Image: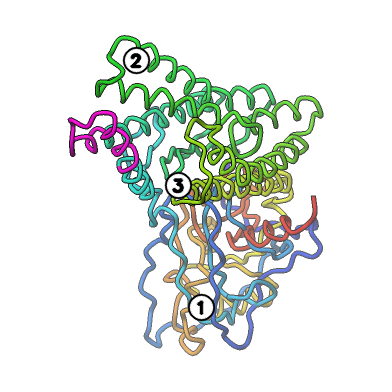
Amino acid sequence: MDVSGGRGQPRPGNDESPDHTGPQPSATPEPGHPADEPAAGRSDGAPAHPRPPATGPGHPPASPRPAPRTPDSGPGEPPASAGGPGDERSTPRADGTGEGRPLAHSGAGQTPPQRPQEKQRGGLLMGRPFGVPVYVAPSWFLVAILITWVFGGQIDRVLPELGAASYLVSLFFAVAFYASVLVHELAHTLAALRFKLPVRRIQLQFFGGVSEIEKEAETPGREFVLAFVGPLLSLVLSGLFYLALLAVDPSSVPGVLLAGLMISNLIVAVFNLLPGLPLDGGRMLRAVVWAISGKPMTGTIAAAWVGRALAVAVLIGLPLLTQSGALGSDAVDNVGMDTVLDALLAAILAAIIWTGAGNSLRMARLREHLPELRARTLTRRAVPVETDTPLSEALRRANAAGARALVVVDPDGAPLSLVREAAIVGVPEHRRPWVPVGGLAQDLTDGMHVSAELAGEDLLDALRATPATEYLVVEDTGEIYGVLSAADVERAFVKAMARPS
């Protein structure tokens, strides 16, 4: 399939979406509003370096040419980010408002939002095992300090002869414990890679770690395995630490460390096996319900609501169990600082579980609506113009054709670049007759050629691979079909998500 662009001119009207309206200019400029940033792109997506616009009077408007037939614009709903499955990108619209504005008279200029790669990627990069980046979030340093303080006090009571060195031992325990968490996450990652599911990154954070797997398992069996390997490896680690503990003195520094790592990995395994999303046990429950019902959405709903019930149980039950002494500590009759800390910990855990369950439901809805995003119906009508065409003349042609996009072509009609809406906005109306469109265009790369047949997750994957504000949509033959704006995808996505499942 040739998606690199050909010499064909835009095709005649797209009749698949009668309500698809193209961008139209407004007579009065309006301030733009950048789109909300969604979940995760990975390239910098910086616009190509524009050529300096001509400023002298020596650029009179070119003689008008009849506009070629182009695809009818589709429903002008702007793009969404891909976070759902994963893409975080926001792209400003030239008109700043959304729909129904002509290309010629866009609103005031605006700066495109910073792309995710230009932002913090998730903390401190520690390495790339199996090609997957591992980040340590800033919150990890807070929990390391907390573990060092709490566990250091316990070591000081067991081994008072260590003195201040007990806190160094405790710091080592904090690092070793999170190394165990990393092994847990690597188990998920390796299973995902084995099933050919892309993994964006592993992040170690305040309450453990997370493997960001970008796609869903294709079968409930794979989903079950993918979820189970993490707790299984934590149980294996706990057993290994127990066997090592048998070979040392339990009251020595190695004995205390091994006992702590054995217990902590056992807690991690048991906690993650609880049957509610977003925990591993919740994903296992989802896989079971999915296998029985044949519907992944049914499994998600069941596991998410069990997760919410689990959050309530943790909020109420954990402080009660701690205060009663059921978890191994002495029973407490009065309310003290330890009781308050237990209640705070329970509230944080409950909030994490409740929020994760809700996010799982939203992600399931996202995947359910993804097929509604089709490049063909979201594409804007475009008119081809040559590099030296004055902006005012290009906009006149676009308005006459009811188009919302400009494609710069060579004398043979082959596409060279796309005129950026944000750049048009920045040119005052009185200067447009002297500014050639070539100075406002972004050169086309291979990744900016999108097939008109793409839809759903395939479309979002293509946009994530080459983040940009506009893409050239082409037929399989290489003919120009139109221009796809990332903002239109975002809006269409938001509109689809607003509809009930």
Residue 107 visible in image: yes
> Could you tell me if the residues under marks 2 and 1 are in contact, i.e. CB atoms within 8 Å?
no
Q: Earlier in the sequence, mark 2 or mark 3?
A: 2
The amino acid beneath tag 2 is Leu
Q: Is residue 400 above or below residue 329?
A: below
Quadrant holding the N terminus = top right
Q: Nearest the camera: 75 or 151?
A: 151
Query: Which residues are the magenta region?
Result: 149-169
Classify mark 3: residues with Cα within 10 Å, few (<14), some (14-19) or many (20+): few
Q: Which residue is mark 2?
A: 245
Q: Position of residue 140 (x, y in %)?
A: 37, 45
Whole-number angstrom distance, CA of label 3 to CA of label 1 = 59 Å
Q: For this view, does 212 lie left or right of residue 378?
A: left
Return the mark for residue 338: 3
Return the mark for residue 303: none
Q: Position of residue 264 (x, y in %)?
A: 43, 29
Q: Which residue is mark 1?
A: 425
Whole-number angstrom distance, CA of label 2 to CA of label 3 = 29 Å
Front label number (2 vs 1): 2
Q: Is residue 378 magenta?
A: no
Q: Position of residue 467 (x, y in %)?
A: 49, 53
The amino acid beneath tag 1 is Val
Front label number (2 vs 3): 3
Q: Is residue 190 above or below residue 127?
A: above
The residue sitting at 56% across, 50% down in the picture is: 347
Q: Is residue 485 above or below residue 285?
A: below
The amino acid beneath tag 3 is Asp
Q: Nearest the camera: 174 or 87?
A: 174
Q: Earlier in the sequence, mark 2 or mark 1?
A: 2
